[in-house]
Amino acid sequence: MNDTFRPFFFPVTLSILLLVGVFWWGGWTAFLLALLLTVLEVTLSFDNAVVNARVLARMNEKWQQRFLTWGILFAVFFTRFVLPIFIVAISVGMGPWAVAQLAFFDAKHYGELLEGAHYAISSFGGAFLLMVSLKYFFDARKDIHWIHVIEHQLSRFGRIEAIEIGLALSLLAVLAFSLPLHAATILFSGVIGIIIFIAMQGVANSFTLSTGKAVAAGSAALFVYLNILDAAFSLDGVVGAFAITSQLPVIIVGLGIGAYFVRTLTVCLVRQKTLESLVYLEHGAHWAILGLAAAMFANLFYQVPEVITGLVGLVFVGAAYWSSLKERQKAEAVH
């Protein structure tokens, strides 16, 4: 088997078994819905894989493997099931156990409650992802630029201390002022997203990943950061999944398969050193993240279709991939 495709053998096998199980449980309708959710999850999260790859490269091999094993359990069980239950519970003032019962026995009503919590979800996810993208572009040490006329100027602004925090808080204030009935939810959720990003960045950067215990401790911190990043990416997708179907097994299988493929892709990008050979791919991914953050904030005012969000990400990453190939061809021609 080709080394490129070997890491995908187990995910493909597991996906086939799960999809067969969904077909046995709910017939062709359930099968096709699960397949659709899988495609949407992979499409919407491809930029997540590229960004994760850069972080994963700083982790030792043991924690990279745990990203695929422990991490996928966290991604499917916590991010796509437990966390939304707690968000709904806080939003509507119900107990988590009561909300969990709704998820199992009245998924349609649960989906409606989850949709009602979209102010908290969009504000938290939008703020966190905005910080991820701004932190990347407002970097005074960044000397490789894809969209040079913009990125070069943004990197110069990175000399201003904590500029990304100031901009994110200012945007939250404007959004809260524009939606006074939901101002408290928007501010609280958005500030929590910013605080979590700052805390995880601080913890991850406090370790020098060189040898011994520092490697393990730093890898563990980055592991937590990656799973929080995955949560920020995925919450909006969970809400969108309930708009497609209220069948919980179908949602868990569809989103779970998609999440596993994205994580496997992330590990492959690291081990094949793809980001080193495709120099602009990471830039495109961060532009896609900025677009996703904008879409989540736009969701505060009106529903942005998942297809539009996915296309924005694919366009940025695809354009960055093409530019990277052209740049690599130029470099090879010179040598």
Image (cartoon, rainbow, N blue to C red):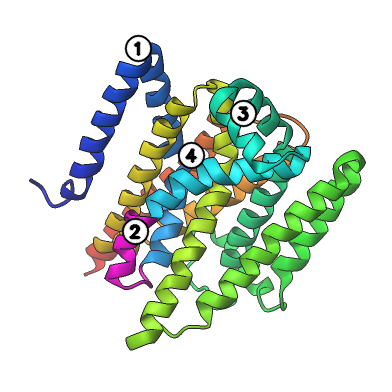
Q: Which residue is mark 2?
A: 278
Please tell me whether mark 3 sits on a helix, a strand or a loop: helix
Asked if the residues shown at circle 2 and circle 3 are in contact, with their CB atoms under 8 angstroms apart, the answer is no
Which residue in the rendered view is the most extreme toward the left? 1
Indicate left or right for 16 with 299 as reference: left
Residue 317 can be seen, yes or no: no
Q: Which residue is mark 3?
A: 102
Residue range highlighted in magenta: 57-70
**Nearer the camera: disc 4 or disc 2:** 4
Label 3 to label 4, Cα distance in Å? 27 Å
Asked if the residues shown at circle 3 and circle 4 are in contact, with their CB atoms under 8 angstroms apart, the answer is no
Q: Amino acid at mark 4?
A: Leu
Residue 264 can be seen, yes or no: yes
Label 4 to label 2, Cα distance in Å? 20 Å
Label 1 to label 4, Cα distance in Å? 24 Å
The mark found on residue 44 in the picture is: 4
Residue 94, quarter of the rendered image: top right
